[in-house]
Amino acid sequence: MVGVYGLDGEKVSDAALPSVFETGVRRDLIKRAVISLQTHRLQAYGPSWMAGKDTSAFSYGPGRGLARLPRVTGGGPARGRGAIVPYAVGGRRAHPPVPERVLSKKLNKKERLLATASAVAATADKEIVESRGHRVDGVSEFPVVVVDGFESLNKTKDVSLALAKLGCSSDLERAKSKSIRSGKGTKRGRKYKRKKSVLIVVSSDASLSKAAGNISGVDVTSVKNLNAAHLAPGANPARLTVYTESALKELEMRFSEAI
């Protein structure tokens, strides 16, 4: 049994905990599932087919006492210099990346389902949740279950207040900070690194998703769309997760095959 809490943070009833929370925490499967989901977002890439070959250079062939590599024609400082071939300065690459390469990694259906079930079970373990970096001193019970009225909230301030009443205020404050990413990602639309905070799992996310979308680090998803990447960002399991009472019942139906 697990306690069901109201929007004021007070316990209102008890609910049966689905058997999916008895699944063992398989970090290896969770990592494979998250990596598989990440690779599905990758785009094909490769150089231009003329890269390194857009030049007037050609080979003189044998009989001149010179190497046969293509040489630049005309005048100027580049005259007679090698080009095109991979070992020449400015030449093509020998084995460049090709757009035909399959970047996505596949995962068996049963493994993917078990990985998600394992990630769900990890959210009920306070020690693993804390080890991930979440601040959960104010949280009374794991997993965190709230009444269905939480799904109908349509104001950001109401969602923030309800999460604070549930003991998540410290973690929400932690997620407000951001840092500048090191490396080339800063030039590719990924300048800042932001922390992940509360994940809200609902039966239907019509109004709540918009209201909670303005809170830094908070994500909303339905049981139907729930996957390992939601529950274990960066392949690190046990994200601080809040379930609604209806979502808790739907979990049993979805993961009955994985148990």
Image: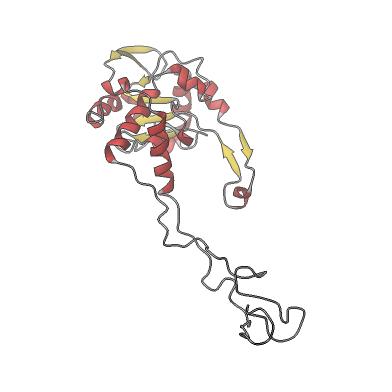
Residue 154 visible to an observer of this rendering:
no
Tell me the residue at 63%/37% (across/down).
179
Task: Say left or right for 28 vs 216.
Answer: left
Quarter that holds the N terminus: top left
Colour scheme of the rendered structure: secondary structure
Tell me the residue at 42%/15% (across/down).
9
Residue 213 visible to an observer of this rendering:
yes
Quarter that holds the C terminus: top left
Residue 197: x, y in percent? Answer: 49, 29
Residue 10: x, y in percent? Answer: 39, 12
Residue 196: x, y in percent? Answer: 50, 32
Tell me the residue at 45%/23% (across/down).
163
The answer to whether residue 102 is above or below residue 56 is above
Tally of numbered tags: 0
The answer to whether residue 165 is above or below residue 216 is above
Nearer to us in this view, 70 or 77: 70
Quarter of the rendering containing residue 170:
top right
Nearer to us in this view, 71 or 120: 71
Quarter of the rendering containing residue 66:
bottom right
Nearer to us in this view, 149 or 77: 77
Residue 144: x, y in percent? Answer: 39, 20
